[in-house]
Image (spheres, grey):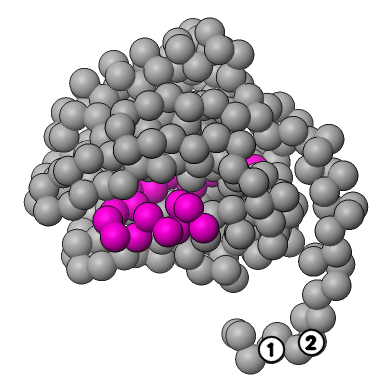
Amino acid sequence: MRTALLQSSGTLGSVADNLKALDEAAARAAAAGAGLLAAPELYLTGYAIGDDIPRLAEAADGASAAAIAESAARHGVAIAYGYPEREGETVFNSVQLIGADGARLANYRKTHLFGCFERDHFTPGEQAVVQAELGGVRVGLMICYDVEFPENVRAHALAGTDLLLVPTAQMHPFQFVAESVVPVRAFENQMYVAYVNRVGKEGEFEFVGLSTLAGPDGVARTRAGRDEQLVFADADPAFLAASREANPYLRDRRPGLYASLI
């Protein structure tokens, strides 16, 4: 499945502008033959919005979800996007996947919140593995800091995730996560990992870009630079099946030895 990664920070605080930019990216992705477009963490609102988070947060089936569903169906491309999700008085840092027919396929709430900023404004999610079937590929969802916990990604591997989407807001000086950790996670868990980042300065934060899609061989199929880009790579089910057959990591596990981990 050809996958497009939208490396962009959008317009801080303007949902309307970011919806427009996402629609334009969907058109470009579809024209390039992509079946899936992924945008970064909190793409709809911006990351450094602080006390505006409660005002800008929306329900998973809110107005922005409807607009993105219409865009996905019009362009014939699935879209995954980060946003602040409101449920009652609770706000989550979430990512939603909408199919190429406009159907809402999956919604994931970030389980591992990073730093005081996130812990002050969001409630952590409680479901580690969220998946959906997309074009014969089992797609899993995760957000930023979550991928830095090996148990999280291994849970997806054991649940059969083929392509793990990780919208992120990776900051300086942690660029080694994009450069090194993500390819290792893909290799040790025998899956594709798509890590799509914000870029540039935003408030007190400086995002490093370097969005990548890494394969089960640990090799980056694409890697963006430090500016706004739309990059493409393929998640090949046949290559994944052959890699899983050749690589014994999951077969050679000895779960009885790992009880101390939980």
Q: Relative to the observer, which residue lies in front, 191 or 260? A: 191
Residue 92 in sight here: yes
Q: Is residue 107 left or right of residue 129?
A: left
For label 1, the crowd category at 10 Å Cα-Cα, with few meaning under 14, some 14 to 19 and many 20 or more, is few
Reply yes or no: does residue 165 show up in magenta: yes
Q: Is residue 33 magenta?
A: no
Q: Residue at horizontal 60%, vertical 21%?
A: 35
Q: Secondary structure at mark 2?
A: helix
In this picture, residue 35 sits left or right of residue 125: right
Residue type (three-letter) at the residue carrying disc 1: Ala
- Eyeballing the image, is 152 above or below 191? below
Q: Residue sitting at 85 percent across and 64 percent down?
A: 248
Residue beneath disc 1:
259
Residue 164, image x and y in percent? 59, 47
Instruction: Give the alpha-carbon distance from disc 2 to disc 1, as whole Å.
Output: 6 Å
Mark 2 and 1 residues: CB-CB less than 8 Å, in contact? yes
The residue pinned by badge 2 equals 256
Judged from the image, the secondary structure of the residue bearing numbered disc 1 is: helix
Q: Residue at x 61, y 85 (%)?
A: 261
- Quarter of the image with the C terminus is bottom right
Examine the image and state in which quarter residue 144 appears: bottom left
Could you say which quadrant of the image residue 138 lies in? top right
Query: Bounds of the magenta span?
Result: 163-180
Residue 169 appears at what percent x and percent y?
A: 32, 49
Amino acid carrying mark 2 in the image: Gly
Question: Which residue is drawn at the image coordinates 20% and 68% (left, top)?
Answer: 116
